[in-house]
Image (cartoon, helix red, strand yellow):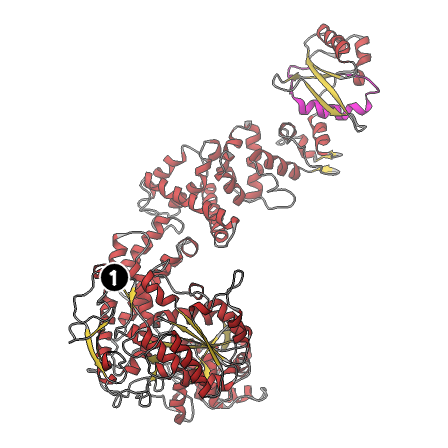
Amino acid sequence: MGAIVPELDQRVITGLLATHLPRAKGRQLMLVHGRYAETAAKVFTVPDGEGDRRSVHVAHATSVLGITDAWQEHRAQHGSDLLVVTTDVADERVGVDLLGEMMRSRTITVDEADIVKQLFGAADLDPRMRRDPWLWLPAALIAAEPREGWPQRGTVLTLDAAMRALVGVRLGLEGVFEGGASVDVDALLAWSQQPGGPDRFAVLPEAEQQGIADWLEQRAGEAAPLLLRLAVSGLGPRATALGLLSSVLSESGDPSSADAALALGSLLNGVRFRPSELRAFTSAVEGTLTRWIGEAAGRGTQSEQARHRVLDVVRQADQLAESVHLTGVLADNPFLPSGFQERLRRLAEALSESADAAQAAWEFVREHQLAPSFYPERVELARMAVRLRRWLDQDVPGVSSVGQAVQAHVTNWGWADRALTQLWQGDTVADPVVDEAYGKLHDAARQRRHLLDEAFASCLARWTQDARPNRPGGDLLIENVLNEVARPLADAAHPPLVVVLTGMTGAVAAELGEELTSTGRWIELGEGGLRRAAVALMPSVTAVCRASLLSGRPVLGGPEEEKENFIAFWQEHDHTASLFHKSDIPAEVGHRLRDQLISAIAMDEVVGVVLDTIDESLDHGRQSPGGPWTVDSVTYLPELLNTARAQGRPVVLVSAHGHVQDRDSSSATPALAEDVEAARWRTGPAGDGEVALDGPRVLENGGRITAAWSEDIHYTPGKAGYRGGAALAEMAVPVLVLAPTDEVAPEGWATVPRESVEPSWWERSAEPVSPFVPAVEPKLTKKLARKTGLRPKTVATSDAPVDDETAKAPTAQNPPMEKAPEPEQSLGWRVVSTKIYDHQKAFVRRAPDRKVVAAVVDALDAAGGTLSLAAVVAAVTASGGRAPSRPEGIVTVLTRLLNVEGYDVINLIDTRTRVRLNRDQLIQQFELTQAEGGVA
């Protein structure tokens, strides 16, 4: 029967019996050509085809006598059980009597293909499985049959289905490649990271290894065979990390490439590869890591698993690179943690060069693959550093009045404080180069803020002597906030919810305002489209400032006085009101807000709520010191906002006073001073870093105190922060008015454009912006500037502080102005004066006046081509146009007027929240020369 005797096991015997037992005609003996494996079970059961199972005994015999003895012994001991004898004895040597007892009356030769058909329940096999190079496959399928059996495949078992099943079981990827699922390297690389995964492939017979590798190469590309060779060499767990390092060979001509190749070769442990294989493997690894990084950005178990996979790979790659001195060569690798750190070092160097160099370096940091999901705080910190560099590159601002200073603080300098707060904390990974660069930048920015606080204190000292509620000098006073901000809202539509965020600074207001308006759930409203800033009373402590804010007049008091005076103020103005303090807010278990508070917000009355989270953090610290303040981090604020929005109420977010942070560890010991009354104010003569204040706005010590304006001074033991001084961060009181829609806006109020509260240096794309100027009727210029609130690059400077009575500096009511362009010279006017515009206008029903279109074009042009929808609407109304019921509507009309022949001259971007003007396309489509467009 031939020299080769196949080794058989239980799977083969079971398959043969499944084929021949139904036709056995009661015979119990089956002879099979082969040798039964010594380790295989000698007794087991098989289905009998009639719903029952029969016991099977297996023996091996090498002679006719051995076969006969085995049969006789079986009959004597096991009755009706089946006996299978494996043998290499030829049929012609078996006696007739024995042949008569045998199934099929002959020795059965194993046909592996038939067994495979039986195992998969298939009527036939793909014919390729019966010839090279797939002859190894049937035996492999028989050997790999899982305990629960192979899935039934129907009429024909295709080669693809067979290989998918085999690879799934052999590699431990059951179900991954089943059906029509894509066979890709992602799954193979994930498999290589699994404990024991690569070992399963390494122990397979060589023919099976080669066959699986060839099939995977056809399906997944050239990367698969190299990955499997690494697995065979024991490098499977390192395969993905090695794929990252193999990028060192992608730079041809690099003098270090030869050394890098040798270093990489030492890590590959002699595994051979074609250059195309290595390139494919590198590309596959990078693509897979990119996808894993994307998965890690979400939440849940799968994202957490992806995060661990990514970190395991990149950290292992960094360790391998360091072991063969490849870290320097891989400095630009976009996946390695060491590459991210190197990018931060380059940023640190660029910070000392220029703002543009720093911005380019930061963009390189941001482009690192790990940046958004694994190092977001570090990327944001680097961004804050670049922003501070841009701020320091601005002309040195000046302080010309108290009102101008507090307004500038809320819309400019407070944003610098916001960046400073984060930079003070430093990077989470200590690096001497980065730490030194951040430290220098922080100190330079603090020095500028120190000078601004000093100048402000000087102005404040003179202004305080005469400023009164009825003589504010054009400034918004904290005791007038209810009357000038909340009362117009109450008279116009729904009564407001007044939320007092005690301790909120301009920096915190910038964070909260940005978060609340960025989602589209809230818009910010303001008189003339401006965010207001009030001036605190002195000393800037809660008992003085919050009591006066809620009373509508200067007064000292606590919660009881605040509640009584708040209700009385609104009664005087024909509104009922209620005020809730900390103890009045929480509900019983299972609810957040007390029923009385929810009911008050649902009723037609003014509701005030005092939240002390920010102020209390000064005494107790925060869970994440130096991190940004968010809506969720202020206790009860999310619930209050949601409840107010559900009722259509506007919300006034206002501070009682600000605070300064303790940024100097050496200042834990209080400054030595006499007559100390609180952390930041005392009585007695003023010294360095202090200012003497007296007048009607000072409510302690008979109207005369000494307050610290320097952030470094405090008179009481060290805490996270302090209140009561004369620094801008303490005296400037941000006032934010939020509403679900602009329908609740009082007359003369408008949506506050982002451009009017975000300084031009905050984002690189934001060019220095001048006030909008209408293309015709220059007499509207001041009105237009008041509505937009946009300003030149820097605050007007002054050699010396001056009184408000003589100051003509920018304030909320008098924003900084630049010289208006002559109407006939503006780009917008040139456009609307063309015959092409007349032709376009003929096809637009109810087109706005030329002056409105020109004003919008000029506003967009002045802003560098991009404005928020709110700013565009402000330009429309300021030029005499009617405010559209739908802001997008005016842009739709403008597209019909300006998008000649379908070209995108003007369009909505950023999920339809901003408007972009393509200046070059505008000039081309309306056949203007560059000179006519305002370009030399």
Q: Residue at x 33, y 41 (%)?
A: 322
Say left or right for 394 vs 162.
Answer: left
Residue lying at the far top of the rendered structure: 65
Q: How many marks?
A: 1
Judge whether residue 2 is colored magenta: yes
Quadrant of the rendered image containing residue 654: bottom left
- At label 1, counting other C-alpha atoms closer than 10 Å, the crowd grade (few under 14, some 14-19, many 20 or more) is some
Q: Is residue 62 above or below residue 311?
A: above
Q: Quadrant of the C terminus?
A: bottom left
Image position, residue 246 (x, y; %) = 40, 43
Was residue 780 drawn as part of the magenta stretch in this picture? no
Residue appearing at x 39%, y 41% in the figure: 316
Instruction: Check the image and report above or below for 301 versus 352.
Output: above
- Which of the 4 quarters of the picture holds residue 51? top right
On screen, residue 671 versus residue 546, left or right, reads left
Q: At 24% across and 79% down in the image, what residue appears?
A: 398
The magenta segment is 1-29
Give the residue pinned by disc 1.
Answer: 718
The three-letter code of the residue at mark 1 reads Gly
Residue furthest out toward the right: 25
Q: Measuring from the top left, give residue 373's x and y in whole percent.
A: 44, 55
In front of the other: 362 or 717: 717
Residue 670 image-quadrant placement:
bottom left
**Quick check: 471 above or below 703?**
below
Q: Which is nearer the eye, 877 or 901?
A: 877
Relative image position of residue 205 (x, y in whole percent):
56, 27
Which type of secondary structure does the marked residue at label 1 adopt? loop
Between residue 331 and residue 713, name the one nearer to us: 713
